[in-house]
Image (cartoon, rainbow, N blue to C red):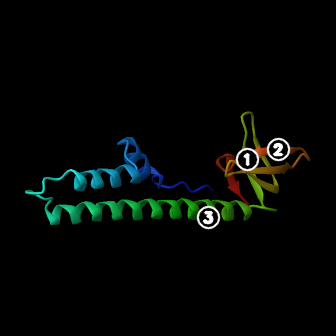
Amino acid sequence: MAISPVSSTSDVNNRIDSMGLDMQSLLQIILTQLTYQDPLKPVDNFEFVSQLAQFTSLEQTRQMTDKIDNLLSVQSATQTLGLLGRNVDVQTDTALLSGVVKSVSFKDSQPQLTIETDSGQFLTNATISQIVSVR
């Protein structure tokens, strides 16, 4: 049984990237503000601290997103490796096949299963989403 996340952890990065800003850009904006501020009307300390807090929060969110992505990859790999030697029912384009998971490999961080069907044939490159049931 495949478990899919409610939403991708990279959604945060996608939203930030869609604004066209990265960490370097935000830091550059803050430095430019400081460089060109009017000496008679300096930037409000509260506003400056607020911008730095947002910058720090954004960086921490990115780091947390990366760690969660890594955790999800490890969980997926562990879940997939647990299928080795198990009897499964797999839905292919043409039929529902039963067999035993013989090997697991990873292609582009996605698990690929090799399944020996009940008829002795090998189904290669099966995906987790094709598994209907595990026995």
Query: Could you give the CA–CA distance between mark 1 and mark 3, rounded to whole angstroms?
Result: 21 Å
Q: Earlier in the sequence, mark 3 or mark 2?
A: 3
Amino acid type, mark 1? Val
Q: Quadrant of the C terminus?
A: bottom right
- Check disc 2 and report the residue beneath it: 123
- Check disc 3 and report the residue beneath it: 75
Amino acid type, mark 2? Leu
Q: Nearer the viewer, residue 37 or 78?
A: 37
Callout in the foreground (3, 2): 3
The circle drawn on residue 90 is 1
Callout in the foreground (2, 1): 2
- Classify residue 6 as left or right of residue 100: left
Q: Residue at x 82, y 56 (%)?
A: 103
- Classify residue 96 as left or right of residue 12: right
The circle drawn on residue 101 is none
Q: Nearer the viewer, residue 25 or 93?
A: 25
Circle 1 Cα neighbour tier, 10 Å, few/some/many (<14 / 14–19 / ≥20) = many
Q: Percent position (x, y) of residue 86?
A: 78, 61
Q: Percent position (x, y) of residue 122?
A: 87, 45
Q: Nearer the viewer, residue 98 or 37?
A: 37
Amino acid type, mark 3? Gln
